[in-house]
């Protein structure tokens, strides 16, 4: 298997990123952030979530955010929908792409969406059917694929089973999530061939949180198996409030730096992603964790590059 020449990067900052921030972020700032991301060349930008505002208060303004963002032609803006109620809200706001989300850990699924895995698949059956009847693009997520925050064992066979069930419902693509950033490349090497026995390579994405610094190594391992869709967040934002210990996604800048350095095309401008990160970092008022973002920003500091006295 040769490594892909082109990778599609799916931007998570506005959804996975902002859902996990403590500060209240204004609707104007969310819209500006997404509009900046739309100028980068990214073709998949997860915009927000139509979930219960009690579960994720940070994204309670989903309808207004979605309605106000400038939808760039050629860019897909998926939104999370946990049930038909969420889908109806998404439709009303003008969405054309959704994501349903379950997991390979029963305990996490219960805490995140208050359903068993079986119940989630049943609930999504109606969501995906309805979405497809309306010509929506549909993504499925399998979270906690490399480990659960609650200590329950996650087996690759369960990840495969849940993935298969999401495709059976009619998902166009399934993203395999390392929600708490515990995975290592040998696990990727074990899981990917199992998935690819039954699923097409161009329908599987990986979503690595970088909690323990293994996300890029895991991307590199997945690339060796031909995987060509990766999720990341500008600046390295992200985390799930229902997964204790989860920190940010792999930074989009880090992913782009490595892919471009390897000669793999993405169509995305690292400089423009960095500009979007700089904007949202200023709003959030804390350091962003992407190493590449940090290195590039440091290079802007007066005096950088001078020999130490
Ligand atoms: P529940 O409490 O079991 O459901 O929540 P419910 O039907 O009893 O609803 C509770 C309240 O929410 C009710 O309001 C409903 O009307 C309302 P009340 O009567 O109490 O005033 N409600 C809604 N409101 C707006 N939009 C909706 C909606 N649905 C119900 N769609 C539920 C179940 C699934 C709704 C809830 O648990 C929920 O919304 N969970 C979302 C959690 C979430 O968003 N987690 C983060 C995303 S997953 C993630 O980050 C992982 C990922 O990044 C991949 C990875 O890293 O691995 C994707
Ligand atoms: Mg995530």
Image (cartoon, rainbow, N blue to C red):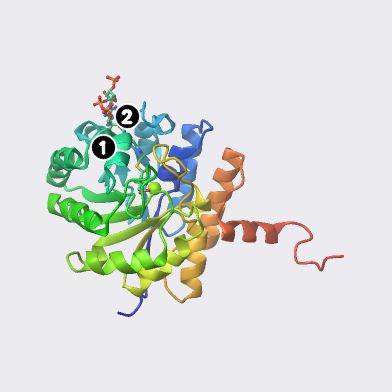
User: Which residue in the protein does label 1 denote?
Assistant: 82
> Which corner quadrant holds the C terminus?
bottom right
Residue 13 location (% of width, % of height): 45, 47
Q: Residue at x 55, y 60 (%)?
A: 271
The quadrant holding residue 230 is bottom left
CB within 8 Å, label 2 to label 1: yes
Q: Residue furthest bottom?
A: 2
Q: Secondary structure at mark 1?
A: loop
Tell me if the residue at label 1 has its CB under 8 Å from ligand 1: yes
Q: Residue at x 61, y 39 (%)?
A: 285
Q: Does residue 236 appear left or right of residue 74 in this picture?
A: right
The quadrant holding residue 207 is bottom left
Please state which of residues 258 and 244 is positioned toward the viewer in this rendering: 244
Please state which of residues 48 and 206 is positioned toward the viewer in this rendering: 206
Q: Secondary structure at mark 2?
A: loop
Mark 2 → mark 1, Cα distance in angstroms: 9 Å
Residue 273 location (% of width, % of height): 51, 56
Q: Does residue 129 appear left or right of residue 59 in this picture?
A: left
Label 1: how many residues lie within 10 Å, few (<14), some (14-19) or many (20+)? many
Residue 254 location (% of width, % of height): 51, 62
Q: Residue at x 25, y 55 (%)?
A: 159
Mark identifier at residue 52: 2
Tell me if the residue at label 2 has its CB under 8 Å from ligand 1: yes
Q: Residue furthest top?
A: 54
Q: Residue at x 37, y 40 (%)?
A: 48
Residue 242 location (% of width, % of height): 39, 37
The correct choice, above or below, for 300 with respect to 281 in the image is below
Q: Earlier in the sequence, mark 2 or mark 1?
A: 2
Q: Residue furthest right?
A: 309
């Amino acid at each position: 298997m040769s490594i892909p020449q082109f990778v599609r990067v799916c931007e998570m900052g506005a959804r996975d990123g902002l859902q996990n921030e403590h500060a209240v972020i204004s609707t104007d700032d969310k819209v500006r952030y997404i509009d900046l991301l739309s100028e980068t060349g990214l073709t998949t930008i997860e915009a927000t979530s139509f979930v219960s505002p009690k579960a994720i208060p940070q994204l309670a303004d989903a309808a207004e955010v979605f309605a106000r963002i400038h939808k760039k032609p050629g860019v897909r803006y998926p939104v999370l929908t946990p049930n038909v109620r969420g889908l109806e809200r998404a439709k009303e706001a003008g969405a054309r792409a959704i994501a349903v989300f379950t997991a390979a850990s029963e305990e996490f699924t219960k805490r995140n969406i208050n359903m068993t895995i079986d119940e989630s698949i049943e609930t999504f059956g109606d969501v995906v059917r309805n979405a497809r009847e309306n010509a929506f693009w549909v993504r499925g997520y399998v979270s906690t694929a490399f480990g659960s925050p609650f200590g329950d064992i996650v087996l690759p066979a369960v990840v495969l089973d849940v993935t298969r069930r999401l495709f059976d419902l009619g998902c166009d693509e399934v993203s395999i999530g390392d929600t708490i950033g515990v995975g290592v490349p040998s696990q990727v090497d074990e899981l990917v061939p199992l998935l690819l026995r039954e699923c097409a390579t161009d329908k599987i994405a990986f979503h690595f949180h970088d909690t323990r610094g293994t996300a890029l190594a895991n991307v590199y391992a997945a690339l060796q198996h031909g995987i060509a869709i990766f999720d990341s967040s500008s600046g390295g934002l992200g985390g799930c409030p229902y997964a204790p210990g989860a920190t940010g996604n792999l930074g989009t800048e880090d992913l782009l730096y490595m892919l471009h350095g390897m000669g793999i095309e993405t169509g995305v401008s690292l400089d423009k992603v960095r500009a979007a990160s700089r904007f949202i970092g200023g709003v959030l008022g804390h350091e962003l964790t992407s190493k590449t973002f940090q290195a590039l920003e440091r290079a802007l500091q007066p005096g950088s590059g001078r020999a130490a006295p």
